[in-house]
Amino acid sequence: MADTKVRGAPAEALPNPAQAVVRPARAHVLLVDDQPGRLLAYEAMLTGLEVTCVKADSGSKALERLLERQFAVVLLDVGMPDIDGFEVAKLMRRHPRYGRTPIIFVTAADASELDLVKGYGLGAIDYLSMPIAPEVLRSKVAVLVELHERRAELEVVNSQLEAARAQLEAQHEQALAERDAHLNAVFEHPSQLILVLEAMRNEAGAVVDCVYRNANHNAKTFIARSRQALIGARVSEVFPERAQRFFEQCTQVLSTGEPLRYEAELPDGRALISTLHCAGRDTLISTSVDVTDRRRAEAALRDSERRFRAMFDEAPVGVAYNAMDGRFVYANKAFCLMLGYSEKELELRTWQEVTHPDDVAGNLAAGRQVLDGARSYYTMDKRYVRKDGATVWASLFGNFVRNDQGEAVEGVAMVIDITERRAIDQALRDSEQRFRLLANHIDQFTWICDTLGQAVWCNQRWYDYTGRDPQGALGAAWQAVVHPDHIEHVTTSLHRSLASGEPWEDTYPIRGRDGQYRWFLSRAVPVRDGAGHIVQWFGTNTDVTELNRLRADLEAADQQKDEFLAMLAHELRNPVAPIRSAAEVLAMGLLDDRHRSMVGIIRRQSDHLAHILKDLLDVARITRGQITLQSDTVTIASCIDIAVETAAPQLKDKRQRLTVEHSREPLRVRADEVRIGQCIANLLSNAAKYSDAESDIHVRSYREGQHAVVEVRDHGIGIAPEYQANVFDLFYQAPRSVDRGQGGLGLGLAICKRLVDMHNGTIRCRSNGIGQGSTFEMRLPLDEADEPAIVGQRVGCSRRVLVVDDNQDAADSLSTFLQMKGHQTRTVYSGNEAIQEVLAFGPEVVLLDIGLPGMNGYDVAAKIRGIDSAIQLIALTGYGQSADRRRSAAAGFDVHLTKPVAMEELEAALLR
Ligand code: ADP
């Protein structure tokens, strides 16, 4: 209502009956009398009163006057000729306008009883009889005029009041309409669901249900019920699930009168915030807003906040937000860790305080550029000072967070600790420097070339040696100093490596500044990037001129040694044979025990010596590739038999028990029976040697896939694991105590290994260690063809063969063999004879021993070639090294055979 007052007309503007001075016009008095004199007399009597007298001398005239205006009082003569006073009064009373005008009747005589009654019945107020006392008349009129004036005044006031009341009512009405409009506007607020409820209570006053009394249009959208459908319905029907809780809330609100705010969820999942107001004894108003979107937005914001947190808190880079005054607002773990402060500690500081004093200005300037809009962000390497005082180098990415108005409100920095990287960079620079220092001072040339073989860097040594400057050395210029004869293979081999990525190695002469060439071993390895791609090659050249010379010397010495050993063994065998024979002869004589034992010593020791010499010769032959296998299809069993036979005396000496277990099926191998027998014998002999007397030794053969296996096992001293790989090395002997010395030169297993290799087989040893015995396993490929061995009986063409050898036995036996094979032979024992026989016999083939006394084999061959170039010349020699073969080929020999000659090989040569 206060509202209406302000907006409507102000109360002050209304006429105030108390204040307004109402002055109606002068009161009129109607004087009615048929006697003009009396009229004048009345008028005279009334002089002095503030009235205007209107005179009428008849009843009709009086009525005319009455129509013209209002009179305060009518003085009416009763007895008039046309219409008498009563009649006039009667007519006046009938007219509403004069119904209440006071009338004073004037009668000539005393009014009769009847007249009085009649007069008063007509509403007369008074009677006056003639003669009239002027004071009486005057006072009576004055009273009535006064009365009339008062009434007139009242009427004015009344009408004013009426007008004011009407105005107020109109204003009130309008205000009410406005208020309704406002209330309606509030009630139909588009975002609020408003419900008016009437509570139903039980005796205890608790709300047990509510009836909807009103609802705004939003009911439709909020709870899918129209206002019409809702009005009269009960909450217990509309929201059965939530009703009970709601009634409790209603009870609370009605009892306390305090509004209650709560959150509710609609069955469709939307969220509401509702307020329940008390609006009367049993009336409640519920207002609700739909906050689903807000809740979702809040949840989304929380999610995004959480995501943001999760990302930044655990990010491997340091992240910090600073207020514009530099204060830390937020710093993630990585940042705190980097600076050694807790987040709380940082929040008490500014970035300027934790930045190295020398870097603050630079950082400010960089940030200023972004603030000025010159750049959209900034990056810099800067130093922080850790809590412990240490300096941390960081790579910083900086920017600002701006508000909706585009003003920067916070600075954000992402930093990575690069202290280590800088240290590494420094270390790299240092190491690069050291590398250059080293590269320039080592004896080798070092260089780097690109993937096309173009030199990009060479060390000082290279320039010093070649006498070239960088212009004359880089790129492909290095080729200019390579010896012309080598340039082709050097570039070829280098480019092969560049293409394949394999390390490069080549040896060739390079010209020095003095024009002299020296030999260099050149090597290069690829330098790869992180992805494994070759980016460069790093190379060295090592001067091997001296090394080459030394190696050549060494090779020559080695060859001399080999030759010496071979010759020594060869020569020593000659005296051993007669010693042995002499001992045999001596043994046949009559000897006393002492001499018999001496002869025994000579026999055993000369046997031992012969054995060693045989091994030495074997080694010499094997290293020279002079051993030729007499391969045949043989059984493993026969090889084992040979071995057992050979080793038997040794086993017998030590009273050792040998068990031999042959495989059930015959194992056929393509092999030199004697050589394989020799190998197995060697294993047996070792087993005997390195085991106690009276111990057990086992030999076993079996098939394993495509291989035949021979296993020799003993219970002897065993071999320590670290030596098992070495036992097959030449001259190798496992460490042993002096008292257990077993003699030997460490040749046996080396020979075995080489012979087995030559048979495409393998040999290995196993032992669980010292004192655990040893097992040796020899493995040879099975001969699947399984053909029976062809011995002799070769059907082929017959040849005319001249055999030349100063060793008459050898010559004769060879000749006999060839004859048996169906060839025609002649045998001579010297070079001269040979030449004569070539002329006389006309051989197709000459088998010529090189080591002839007098004219040697080479000279003889040259002569024969002079006589007949078509003759096939076959060299027979104890020397089978490549140099020997080259020499025999140069002398005109077609074939070079080493002694002892394998008959198959000889036959193959003859059939060529
Ligand atoms: P050696 O002439 O010394 O026997 P070998 O070549 O036959 O030469 O053997 C080399 C070494 O291997 C031997 O000196 C010995 O130390 C070790 N060896 C060979 N066979 C056996 C075995 N059956 N038991 C223990 N050690 C063995």
Image (spheres, grey):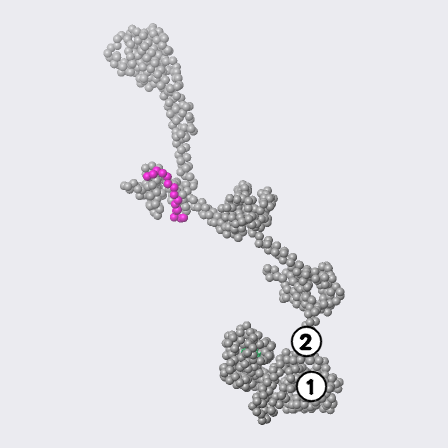
- Residue reaching furthest left? 113
Pointer 2: what residue? 557
Rendering quarter of residue 738: bottom right
Q: Residues within 10 Å of mark 1 (few under 14, many from 20)?
A: many
Q: Say whether residue 104 is magenta.
A: no
- Residue stretch rendered in magenta on the structure: 255-269
Q: Is residue 336 left or right of residue 846?
A: left
Q: Residues within 10 Å of mark 2 (few under 14, many from 20)?
A: few
* Marks 1 and 2, the one that precedes in the sequence: 2
Name the mark nearer the viewer: 1 or 2: 2
Q: Is residue 665 above or below residue 415?
A: below
Q: Is residue 44 above or below residue 860?
A: above
Q: Is residue 483 left or right of residue 757?
A: right
Rendering quarter of residue 833: bottom right
Q: Nearer the viewer, residue 483 or 856?
A: 856
Q: Position of residue 23 (x, y in %)?
A: 39, 16
Q: Say whether residue 257 is magenta.
A: yes
Q: Is residue 782 left or right of residue 444?
A: left
| Image quarter where ligand 1 lies | bottom right
Q: Nearer the viewer, residue 176 or 817?
A: 817
Q: Position of residue 811 (x, y in %)?
A: 67, 89
Pointer 1: what residue? 849
Q: Amino acid at mark 1?
A: Asp
- Cβ at disc 1 under 8 Å from ligand 1: no
Q: Nearer the viewer, residue 354 or 756?
A: 354
Which residue occupies 69% across, 74% down? 553
Q: Amino acid at mark 2?
A: Ala
- What whole-number distance in Å separates the C-alpha atoms at marks 1 and 2? 27 Å
Q: Nearer the viewer, residue 683 or 242?
A: 683
- Cβ at disc 2 under 8 Å from ligand 1: no
- Secondary structure found at label 2: helix
- Secondary structure found at label 1: strand
